[in-house]
Image: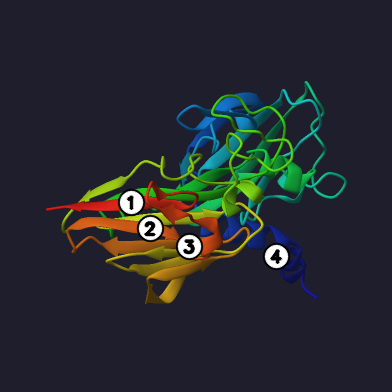
């Protein structure tokens, strides 16, 4: 074997590494966030307040927006009475950043902090939540959206966005006002509890119907709904008067988008759906598991809101 050939063989690993580096996209900006997990008073409807566990005193937690290729750096500050973590649901993070104690990340003890760092994945809708006492901590309110935006140079396929985060706030002590007992059955001021109250309070974007703010759009707008189910039940979300064109599921773009007016959201599932607002009027958007919605003469409760298309 010649000396030149020996040198070439020795250099192959280095050449391969250089080629991989050249082929990989350059990392974007470093995007830094701090999420403080703590107990907070949160109003789910006028006069009905609960002591929830929140990130930065909001329910859902802050919507984190980054661009594909950014370096995402999130510091969790734990002010809860117990340990917690953050799991980046659907994001292919480095192994030590995944937020599962004893497997992929440490538990963050009460009073401690931990910094998660990972490259932002492909554009899409993702979410974050604890993976320690998961059902209990998410049920108390610890969850939020992570949105990875397309590059600024990409053609815009919608006019505006709406985040629709479904949550199931578990029964727990600490409610204030409104006659809302959250110890055993969450009865409302001595009357019989509604089905939604007996299973915990069902929320959209941290509020319960009929006090979920309306979505107002103009006729002709294309509206992207980013939907996630943070709870444990299936919620088939139904839109009256119009339909979604489903363009992505669980952060993955669909090669063949399809139309739906009832979209079942399974536990932990995400959908991106675009609505062409072409039908003026006030339209109901609700869960079609009708035990999750009471639609009496006083208005719809639970998982129900209005989409208003203005002429």
- CA distance separating discs 3 and 1: 19 Å
Q: Residue furthest right?
A: 102
Viewer can see residue 57: no
Q: Residues within 10 Å of mark 2 (few under 14, many from 20)?
A: many
Q: How many numbered discs?
A: 4
Q: Residue at x 40, y 68 (%)?
A: 247
Residue under circle 3?
271
Q: Secondary structure at mark 3?
A: strand
Give the image location of residue 146, x and y in percent. Answer: 52, 46
Task: Please name whichever residue, 231 or 13, is drawn nearer the observer in this view of the structure.
Answer: 231
Q: Earlier in the sequence, mark 4 or mark 3?
A: 4
* Label 2 to label 3: alpha-carbon separation: 15 Å
Task: Establish if 22 lies above or below 31.
Answer: below
Query: The N terminus is located in which quarter?
Result: bottom right
Instruction: Name which of mark 2 and mark 1 comes first in the sequence.
Output: 2
Check disc 1 and report the residue beneath it: 306
Badge 4 is on which residue?
A: 12
Q: Pinpoint residue 14: horizontal percent, then vertical percent.
A: 69, 57
- Identify the residue at image location x=34%, y=57%: 284
Give the image location of residue 301, x and y in percent: 46, 49
Q: CA distance from mark 4 to mark 2?
A: 59 Å
Label 3 vs 1, first from the N-terminus:
3
* Foreground of the two, 92 or 275: 275
The answer to whether the residue labelled 2 contacts the one labelled 1, judged by CB atoms less than 8 Å apart, is: yes
Check residue 285 in the rendering and tell me which mark sits there, or answer none.
Answer: 2
N-terminal label among 1 and 4: 4
């Amino acid at each position: 074997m010649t000396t030149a050939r020996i040198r070439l063989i020795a250099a192959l690993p280095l050449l391969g590494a250089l080629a991989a580096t050249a082929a990989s996209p350059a990392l974007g900006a470093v995007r830094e966030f701090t999420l403080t997990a703590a107990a907070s008073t949160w109003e789910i409807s006028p006069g009905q307040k609960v002591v929830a566990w929140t990130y930065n005193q909001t329910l859902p937690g802050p919507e984190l927006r980054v661009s594909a290729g950014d370096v995402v750096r999130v510091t969790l500050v734990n002010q809860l009475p117990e340990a917690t973590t953050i799991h980046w649901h659907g994001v292919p993070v480095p192994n030590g950043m995944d937020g599962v104690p004893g497997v992929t990340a440490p538990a963050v003890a009460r009073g401690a902090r931990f910094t998660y760092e990972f490259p932002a994945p492909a554009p899409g809708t993702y979410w974050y939540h604890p993976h320690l006492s998961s059902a209990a901590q998410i049920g108390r309110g610890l969850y939020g959206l992570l949105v990875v935006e397309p590059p600024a140079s990409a053609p815009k396929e919608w006019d505006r966005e709406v985040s629709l985060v479904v949550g199931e706030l578990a029964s727990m002590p600490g409610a204030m006002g409104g006659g809302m007992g959250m110890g055993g059955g969450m009865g409302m001021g001595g009357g019989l509890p509604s089905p939604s109250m007996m299973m915990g309070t069902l929320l959209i974007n941290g509020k319960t119907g009929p006090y979920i703010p309306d979505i107002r759009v103009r006729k002709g707008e294309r509206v992207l709904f980013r939907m996630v189910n943070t709870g444990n039940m299936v919620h088939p979300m139904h839109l009256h008067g119009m339909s979604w064109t489903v363009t992505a599921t669980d952060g993955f773009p669909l090669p063949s988008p399809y139309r739906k007016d009832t979209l079942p959201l399974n536990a932990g599932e995400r959908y991106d759906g675009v609505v062409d607002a072409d039908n003026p009027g006030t339209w109901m958007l609700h869960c079609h598991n009708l035990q999750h919605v009471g639609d009496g003469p006083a208005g719809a409760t639970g998982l129900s809101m209005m989409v208003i298309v203005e002429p």
